[in-house]
Amino acid sequence: MLTKNQVIITTILNSGISGEGIAKVDGMTLFIPYALVGEKVVAKVVMAKKNFAVARLIEVLTPAEERVRPECKVFTKCGGCQLQHVKYYNQLKIKSANVRDAFRKIAKLDPPVQQCVKSDFTYNYRNKLQLPIGERDGTLVVGFYEEFTHNIVPIEECPLHPEWAAKLIGALKKFMAENDIRPYNEQTGQGVIRHLVARELTGCIMVTLVINCDFLDCTGFAEELKNLFPCFGLYLNVNKEDTNVITGDKYIYVCGERKLKDSYNGLKIEVGPGSFLQVNNSVKDKLYYKVLDQVRSEEQPVCIDAYSGTGILSALMAKHASKAYAIEIVDEAIEDAEHIKKINNLNGKLEIIHGDCSDELPPLLERLKDENTILILDPPRKGCTKAIIKAILKNPPKKIIYISCNPATLARDIGMIMGTLDPDSDVMTPDPSRMNGLYEISLVQPYDMFPQTKHVETVVLMSR
């Protein structure tokens, strides 16, 4: 039986869903972050439960061949990355295995999981920056949260982001210091600036300061941005709530560009500061091409884009389908989607539905049950509601394309659609004998949207 603070020497037998090493010691499963399969390591137990324990890696006695030197100075301290110590090819193997294991363990399904599609850039790939602002021992800190905590690990730069991120961090720290602006304190609820949020698209930087007040004079910060970036936009976002949610509902335009503009596959794109976009442009292009390839392969399909966000994928599909429907609940996303629809002349081709997908999708599937329908599901990490699964089972579309950033909820939802899991039960116990035969899973394709991290984006293709 392992106990807390016990120091052990062991060999890593397997890897877990977060890339951590897994060993067996005294009959117990031991999880050791940053240890690799085959390595002999020294580790100290930091948590011991009845059936498993977690240990901190102290020393690698026999390094694995796939171990490399991390690029980041605060790797293992910052909670942003989990796999910088692994050769990139092996990161791809880990992610494909994690998707495969999720289907097998959660849904008792064994679909054809392909090798994870690589990112063209393994560093400097992120187009979005999102940093908490705080204070440590009276000193301003800007950085990322340590994993599983709200302790901010201060950074000057991040190798996952292009060089504009370091410039932006420096500009904000200078502005706050020169104007004696206090960062937000989670314990007291006092302080002004909570988060720095930014996105870059085609060379233009959209910057948002999340503030704990109704307004902030940021003339000095705007001047700094003007000196640093040829194209930028600056917004304030008001969030005075005691919450972990980063942004509030109210955006205040300050200066510069009001929207980020781009074009993709013949589509004009204009989005605001709160819009959702995939963080890795090269992988996003590969993923969208796979989805559009399925749309193009059908004769005059009708497409439904559930959880459509800003409607970029919906608009792309509308160009190749007889008609496309986009369902979204977020107000700003709806405004962006309507604007994209307008500037691309998609009236009559694209219908945007403002509402909860659980309420809007069931009647839409009923109305389109005799059409050649392709349903795209791209839910948040928590996956689809049971109402959506039941609507699919009642009026199954010809094809389903499920896009997910969470292998666990992806496997659960696919299991319910395939019948190995019961959507009417509160206990998700898989039973392969319940397979309903409604769909065949033709492809499970992971995409490395997030190199150096444990996260993976996956596309599942299902056909009647």
Image (cartoon, rainbow, N blue to C red):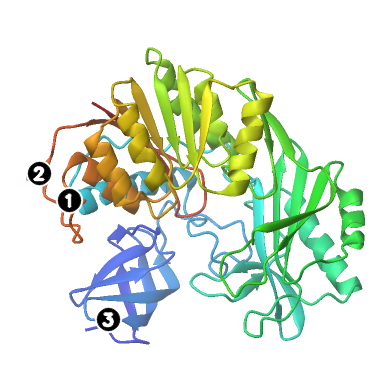
- Residue toward you, 183 or 446: 183
Q: Earlier in the sequence, mark 1 or mark 2?
A: 1
- Determine the image quadrant of residue 266: top right
In the rendered view, tell whether residue 418 sits above or below residue 452: above
Who's the residue at 39% across and 18% down the image?
301
Q: Which of marks 3 and 1 is in front?
A: 1
Mark 1, residue position: 422
Q: Mark 3 points at which residue?
A: 49
Say what amino acid the circle numbered 1 marks: Asp
Spatial CA distance of label 1 from label 2 is 9 Å
Q: Which of 28 and 133 is in front in this view?
A: 133
Image spot of residue 366 (x, y percent)? 30, 32
Q: Are dots 1 and 2 in contact, CB under 8 Å? A: yes
Q: Residue 393: give x, y in percent of width and height.
A: 23, 38
| Earlier sequence position, callout 3 versus callout 1 | 3
Image: 116 above or below 123: above
For the point 16% across and 46% down, the residue is 420
The answer to whether 142 appears left or right of 220 in the picture is left
Decide if residue 284 is in sight here.
Answer: yes
Q: What element carries label 1?
A: loop
Instruction: Kindly report which numbered mark, 2 or 3, lies closer to the viewer in this rendering.
Output: 2
Q: Name the side, left or right, on which 317 lies relative to 262.
A: left
- The residue at 50%/57% (across/down) is 85
Count how many numbered circles sit on residues in the image: 3
Q: Mark 1 packing: few (<14 Cα in 10 Å), some, or many (20+)?
A: some
Closest to the observer, 42 or 223: 223
Q: Looking at the image, which residue is at 17% across and 50% down?
A: 422
